[in-house]
Amino acid sequence: MSALSLTKTRLRAGIWEGRLTGAPHEAGAPGLAAYHLEQVLEGIKLEAVDETHDAWTVKVPLPSTILSEGVQTVLVREGAEGDTLAVITLVAGTPLEEDMTAEIALLRAELDMLKRAFRRHCVETA
């Protein structure tokens, strides 16, 4: 188990950003790698943030070539064989839109059922 912790901070303009903690600055930037379908993604950058708390900003550029229908996953790992520190999930495509529409319809139906049950409960206990 790694002593490093990587937390997502944002995804903007095709660059996933996170905050890495637990890596002392004296040792230099830790070796991180990003993988998509077992292929290394180039361009990952680490910038020192706070030397007193051993914090780093991690930037992973997500190339347009990995965007396609369905769910794509990028893993950020400590080195080549190290622990997985973060999982970046990208979802796109028409089938997903249909799935989301069906899920929203189901949630609305469940919410309506709960509203009716709550109103019935309020009338019975009043």
Image (tube, rainbow, N blue to C red):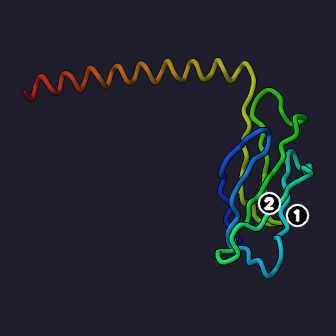
The answer to whether residue 3 is visible is no
What residue does disc 1 label? 80
Q: Which residue is drawn at 15% across and 26% down?
A: 122
Query: Does the residue at mark 1 contact the one at mark 2 (Cβ under 8 Å)?
Result: yes
Q: Position of residue 34 (x, y in %)?
A: 84, 54
What residue does disc 2 label? 77
Foreground of the two, 58 or 65: 58
Residue most toward the bottom?
Answer: 26
- What is the spatial separation of the Cα atoms under label 1 and label 2, in whole angstroms? 7 Å
Residue type at mark 2 is Arg
Q: Where is residue 70 in the image (x, y as percent from the top left)?
A: 76, 29
Q: Based on the displayed image, in which of its 4 quarters is residue 98 positioned? A: top right
Label 2 Cα neighbours within 10 Å, binned few <14 / some 14-19 / many ≥20:
some
Q: Which residue is drawn at 75% across and 34% down?
A: 71
Position of 88 compared to 29: left or right? Answer: left
Residue type at mark 1 is Ala
Whether residue 89 is situated above or below residue 34 in the rendered picture: above
State the SS at label 1. Answer: loop
State the SS at label 2. Answer: strand
Foreground of the two, 32 or 52: 52
Q: Which residue is drawn at 79% across and 53% down?
A: 59
Whether residue 59 is situated above or below residue 95 in the rendered picture: below
Q: Where is residue 21 in the image (x, y as percent from the top left)?
A: 67, 68
Q: Which quadrant would the N terminus be assigned to in this image?
A: bottom right
Q: Position of residue 110 (x, y in %)?
A: 39, 23
